[in-house]
Amino acid sequence: MTDVTTAHGDGTLTRAREELWRAVCARDEDAAARAVFTALDDGADAEDVLLDVIAHTQREVGRAWAENRFTVAQEHSATAIHERIIAAMAHRVPAPAAETPATTVTVACVDGEWHALPARLLAEVLRLRGHRVDFLGAQIPTPHLISHLHTTAPSAVALSSSLPLRLPAAHTAITAVQAIGIPVVAGGAAFGTDGRHARLLGADAWAPDARTAAGLLERGLPRPAGGAVRHSVDDLPHLADQEYTLVTRSKRQLVRSTLAGLEERLPAMRAYSEAQRERTAEDVMHIVEFLACALYTDDGDLFTGFLDWTADILEARRVPAGVLDPALVLLQEELKDFPRTLGLLGRGRDTLRRRDTRPPVPGPGAPV
Ligand code: B12
């Protein structure tokens, strides 16, 4: 592996990053391929190119979308270019020849999880380190994953999820895989920057990035005992209050009544176009889903983090984050018999209120 800070590595990788960024901004796949393959021809390590050039650029793409500098279509184009380049690299840079692979690893995304690119990067890094990799791509339903594992019997499953909303599905997958005696390493942004959600859901291991994951798998993971599938409530006793189940079951009705209440209380909404109404319905659905997910994990930061993130996205599009509070008030009224839910909604409102009283960010030229 090349150290990014060495003169050679730094120069080659920095140049590749700059060229790749320019290429994806121009939606120019040929230029993007040239940026990556020139770096490899100049001696850059393939793993560094995957993680310090392509993954780095992909995260910049995410930031550009969040800050409203990229449209959704530009983000899709950049992601598609990266996926094709990673595939081209895989066919050009051979895996190390080894009589027996280090381990056999199944890399899969949780059911409902469309973010396959982070998992693909991990799969390629493991392949380059000599593991035999079975890459299953985006959103694999757990029953299909389990029947596949019965026939392939890998040494470990690497389970990827980027969206916290998939954590209940991740829990189902983790317990089902462990029940057939195969260890699970979890990773991806959904599990938290410190891996707390991986620990909460009982994964055998967690890693923040592909390099650390490769190291873990090289050392080997102990096999779980197997046997009966654990119930969610065995790992998460707070679920006994049924609040997660009840909120999840009634989420469509909750969205409908919140939208009706918003229309009644915010006269401006009555003049909304069809597209604005759809966007608002999506936002309310997202609030209810993140609320349910925070109930599942009993993690208030998950809900307040989501509200902060949504407020940033709205403000980048010149929509005041204050529009979120009336929706939370309506949910408080609707869910008044659920104490844990009310606690989360209260914390959510505090988070939004604190944003309102934040000192204004100094503009250009303003005294710091
Ligand atoms: C591309 C993208 C998409 C694409 C995915 C296409 C694809 N083929 O992957 C599409 C368009 C499908 C998409 C959809 C959505 N997305 Co999106 N997406 C992204 C984006 C821009 C990049 C994701 C990515 O590739 N990251 C790059 C890699 C390198 O990420 P990484 O996590 O650092 O990966 C490393 C580690 O996590 C680790 N790792 C990863 N997996 C594993 C597994 C194991 C076992 C281990 C050990 C380690 C490990 O190794 C990797 C390499 O080191 C991110 C923004 C971002 N900053 O990530 C948003 C982002 C993840 N998406 C987001 C959202 C909201 C959505 C949608 C809900 C949007 C919508 N309204 O429909 C949907 C949800 C779809 C779904 N059900 O899954 C939000 C999530 C916000 C939140 N609060 O959680 C983000 C953060 C955007 C943002 N800036 O706000 N998205």
Image: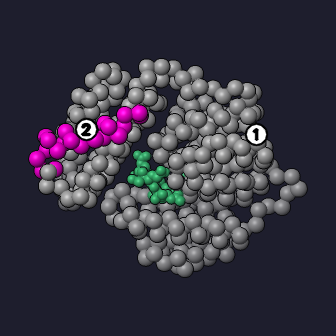
Does residue 256 belong to the magenta stretch? yes
Q: Which residues are magenta?
A: 248-269
Q: Residue 46 sits in which quadrant?
A: bottom right
Q: Residue 60 sits in which quadrant?
A: bottom left
Numbered label attached to residue 220: 1
**x, y percent for residue 14:** 53, 67
Numbered label attached to residue 253: none
For marks 1 and 2 on the same chain, the one whose residue lies earlier in the sequence? 1
Q: Main secondary structure of the magenta part?
A: helix
| Residue lying at the far bottom of the rendered structure | 30
Which residue occupies 30% across, 21% down? 337
- Which amino acid is tagged 2? Ser
Numbered label attached to residue 257: 2
Does residue 64 belong to the magenta stretch? no
- Which amino acid is tagged 1? Gly
Q: Residues within 10 Å of mark 2 (few under 14, many from 20)?
A: some
